[in-house]
Image (spheres, rainbow, N blue to C red):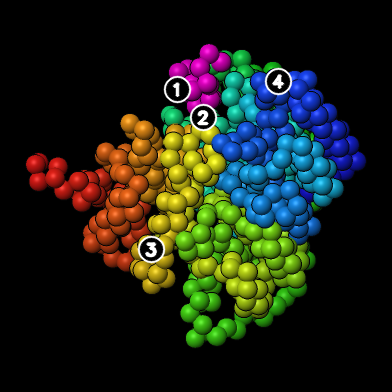
Amino acid sequence: MYRYDEFDKDFVAQRVDQFADQVERRLSGEITEDAFKPLRLMNGVYLQLHAYMLRIAVPYGTMNARQMRMLAHVARTYDRGYGHFTTRQNIQFNWPKLSDIPAILRDLASVEMHAIQTSGNCIRNVTADHFSGAAADEVADPRPYAEILRQWSSLHPEFSFLPRKFKIAVTGAERDRAAIQVHDIGLHLKRNEAGELGFAVYVGGGQGRTPMIAKKVRDFLPEADLLAYATAILRVYNLSGRRDNKYKARIKILVHETGLEELKAQIEQEFEALRDGELTLPAGDVEAIRAYFALPELPARERDRFDTANAGYINWLTRNTVAHKRDDYAMVTISLKPIGGIPGDATDAQMDAVADIAERYGFDEIRVSHEQNLVLPHVARADLPAVYRALEEVGLATGNAGLITDIIACPGLDYCALANARSIPLAQELSTRFGNAERQAEIGDLKIKISGCINACGHHHVGHIGLLGVEKKGAELYQITLGGSADENTSIGEIIGRGFEPSKVTDAVETIVDTYLSLRTDRSETFIEAYRRLGAQPFKDALYPEKAKAA
């Protein structure tokens, strides 16, 4: 993985010193909260419902054991003993004191971590496929390009105060595990007929109040032109994006209002002025950065031997391990979704344990997925039983990756000042209701995603079953969407009908699941496949029988 050079170290240290001074002036009353707000946001500090929240960057979701241990230290020393891994492949701490945040940032800087641009109207943390560099199906590792984008975008003088936040994701496989089509810029790394590396470029995706799927603006952009073309896109957006209405300020609205062809023409015009200039990526520099992400030296190992009587292990092996480039290795998903637990949360002890496991069995590499889980990308199959036992000791051996209890949920009204409804209790109730391992296996792949407000931090728009918390007449209500997806066949879920009271949501989800089970062609037909075949009506009829009878 990437290691800081002297410039990186000085850059982050100076930023910490600068923000420490800003915090001191805020605490002394020299600057107001309104004046402090844009300063803290550029350093990952939010003011939540009950306290400040600090969001720490994990660039493209990659970290090592030393960094994970530092996160455990932050949780223990400055917070309440846990952290929350997010859909941005970051981690946030919900209870730090503002006066402690400079010390936290200094501790983080000691292990090459920071909180720069994890919030604010700037280019946010660039995300990538959590299996990057290890996946058997990828064309090439996309993380070197994510790192190039990180270096280019950090405190970019032209793009530090955009009309709205801006998110970039990159994937290197035909199977999209980075949700690139719901990002402001989505990059699909591919090879052309000549075998050269480049990108399909998508622009204008996003969720929130107005969910939209990104439009393809380039089928193949040569590798060397990545920064020039990204600059062209950002420049068009920065000049023409709306600043009069924050709800219409994202680039997706610009794409919609301008029209795809006209916007493409504007981007190409800017690109022509930049092409073959100083933003052209030198091949040598790309190779130098790519070298940081070389596959570890993986010694040949025999395949694992396991106890077939251990149902928990077999279930975990089936759901939480994926084929690696090497057939004697596997990629392991560490579920942060225990039955009845809070999605994405990990205690300081669990973070320390993951660090230990990564050092002993995972070549000192850990990933954060946008699905709020952790990943060990390189584990010898012979070591899988030992990894399972170590995870089991700290409550991290739940074998539910991709199943109905692998729920994505935002912090919701328990923490967030913007939320209208709670996400966490609903996720816990659903997880408990569907927690039986045999029942989960019968249901198969099914993604539930929950947001506590229209900002869609829980990605409900692209959930197979999406749940959106809204406020109606002073009470919480949950709107259900069906048919969303964030893979290579991205779709926005359809609102199924009137909302449900908190006490009735889990029953409604169970009705949806039972309807699917009764109508699928066979056990191999997944929920999303069945929904696309059947359409919404059978599910509407089951959820609202009074309307079905009236019809």
Closer to the N terminus: mark 2 or mark 4? Answer: 4
Indicate which label's residue lies in the foreground, 1 or 4. 4
Q: Badge 3: few (under 14), some or many (20 or more) residues near its Cα, within 10 Å?
A: some
2 and 4 marks in contact (CB < 8 Å): no
Closer to the N terminus: mark 3 or mark 2? Answer: 2
Q: Badge 4: few (under 14), some or many (20 or more) residues near its Cα, within 10 Å?
A: few
Secondary structure under badge 4?
A: loop
Closer to the N terminus: mark 4 or mark 3? Answer: 4
- What is the three-letter code of the residue carrying label 1? His
Residue 256 numbered tag: 1
3 and 2 marks in contact (CB < 8 Å): no
Q: Which residue is mark 2?
A: 204
Per the model, the C-alpha gap separating discs 2 and 4 is 35 Å
Regarding residue 293, the answer to whether it shows in the image is no
Q: Position of residue 428 (x, y in %)?
A: 45, 56
Per the model, the C-alpha gap separating discs 4 and 3 is 48 Å
Q: Name the dominant secondary structure of the magenta segment.
A: helix
1 and 2 marks in contact (CB < 8 Å): yes
Query: What is the quadrant of residue 381 in the picture?
Result: bottom right
Task: Please state the extent of the stretch shown in magenta in the rendering.
Answer: 243-262
Q: Which residue is mark 4?
A: 32
- What is the three-letter code of the residue carrying label 4? Thr
Q: Position of residue 523 (x, y in %)?
A: 32, 66
Residue at 53% over, 34% down:
417
Per the model, the C-alpha gap separating discs 1 and 2 is 8 Å
Per the model, the C-alpha gap separating discs 1 and 3 is 40 Å
In the displayed structure, would residue 399 be above or below residue 104?
below
Q: Horizontally, is 133 left or right of 494 in the view?
A: right
- Which of 194 and 450 lies nearest the eye of the viewer? 450
Q: Which residue is mark 3?
A: 434
